[in-house]
Image (cartoon, rainbow, N blue to C red):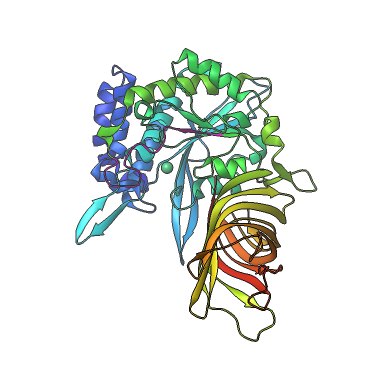
Amino acid sequence: MRKLIHLSWIIGLLIPVLVFGQTEELPGVLKDHVRVLASPEFQGRGLGTEGAELARAYISTHFADAGLEPIGEDYFHDFRVRIGLAWVPAINVVGKLPGSNPELKDEVIVVGAHYDHLGYVYRSGDKSIYHGADDNASGVATLIELAAHLSENREKVGRTIVFVAFDAEESGLWGARMFLQDSVVHPERIRGMFSLDMVGMYEANNALDLKGIASFAGGRELAEQLSQKHHIKLGNTSAEIERRTDTWPFGNIGIPAAHAFTHLKSPYHQPEDTYDLLDYEGMASIKGFLADLIVELSQMPEVNPSDAFAARLKKSEEGRVVEIKKPFFSFGLVLHNGSGHHRYRDEFFRAKSVYNFSGGLFAQFNLSPSFTLQPELLFDLNGSKFGDGTFRRTSITAPVNLQYNLFQIESEARFFILGGAYYRYNVGGKVEGNSIDYGNDFEENEWGLSFGLGVEIMRVHLGWTQRIGMSDINQSHSVGTSLRDRNSYFSIGYRF
Ligand SMILES: [Zn+2]
């Protein structure tokens, strides 16, 4: 029924394409697709909306025109997504181009582009539509033309190609997750995956990223060779799987997956992402390049994960890939904000707290799934307040902490406790307005213990840390007591 309701609509929208489609040049054809998909009638293609239904009708009509086979009775893979307390129906559009090589046609390459976007909102009574031209009418338009092109050249296509316009990407990659979970194509048959997500800004970006292409054995070399033929300048060609698009659920079960992307050059996730801003010549070149790349991959005797990618896959005891391990080494920036004071060992009272800060670089070594070692090198402002005087120091501090992960969600989030030690080298500062005399009155070198807890979500790191000085920083003993430093911090960090 959902197809019939809007049939008149779709015919109206298709007329320009049907009449002029054959003779028009590719950039114009791509522009027609984007103009329709990002038109006000499609209302930003929000999950579960009529605009999304119009988009599905448009895409499935073009899949049929291209000669793609449906996966079942029709082109639709229905599933449900939980948003808050509600279960929202969502639908992927899936078309199949059977491979021409009898020995390879059971193996599949998935080429996907999400068609959902953010829909619309009401701002002080006015409807504001998120048209999503670059995100991701650009990918869907390119997907449709790739399907048409490969279908016309189907004798060159060895493995079976499955084209998917994914739904519910913006709300958590649900289209891709459910495509795999429901075995629309059995995951063991899938040799590789491409996600076309935001490909409309080639000229502005002056490069096409193909992040993840090196997760295919020989993928980067092949892409570089073909990019010269198509005069495409390539950006990122790493073996790392992009998490923020549909490549991630595939990569996370060991399937090589590449993200075609021309960066966030359009008004990303804003109503101003409209069809008139895109580079259709660039999209046409990208389509030509990807068509050749997919044909080559479909004909290769074997398509395997590269060594770099395979080395990062964590497997279950039965040898099934469970997830992508985090890289052994990474680094980032961290800021610790808090307060500190001195403890008088021989007294029952302590000094008052003053603002403390330390910030700098950290490194992470993932020793095992449970343990991460994190050394830091920090510029440090610390001190204390006593009587009516203030003690302020500048130091270089190097904590080394071992983090133990109490629980983790895939490799995307973890909650941990930490413990370790720090060394501090004190370089300057003032006490009651006079410069500190290190080596005479106060110790230059100091050490202590630290403990705390934290959470890391994707690349962002939040935590609480306590540093407890274990060495006496008072050298002259003119104060008559031993002094130990104590600091407490809220920390925020970003891992590159
Ligand atoms: Zn997107």
Instruction: Please name whichever residue, 122 or 3, is drawn nearer the observer in this view of the structure.
Output: 122
Residue 64, can we see it? Answer: no
Q: Is residue 330 above or below residue 382?
A: above
Locate residue 97, reporting x and y percent: 52, 27
Ligand 1's quadrant: top left
Main secondary structure of the magenta stretch? loop
Magenta residues span 258-273
Q: Is residue 282 left or right of residue 415?
A: left
In reply to whether residue 153 is colored magenta, the answer given is: no
Residue 225 place in picture, x, y as percent: 55, 16
Residue at the extreme left of the image, as rendered = 125
Residue 267 placement: quadrant: top left
The structure residue drawn at horizontal position 56% and vertical position 26%, both measured from the top left corner, is 98
Quadrant of the snapshot with the C terminus: top right
Q: Dividing the picture into quarters, in which one does residue 35 lie?
A: top left
> Is residue 270 part of the magenta span, yes or no?
yes
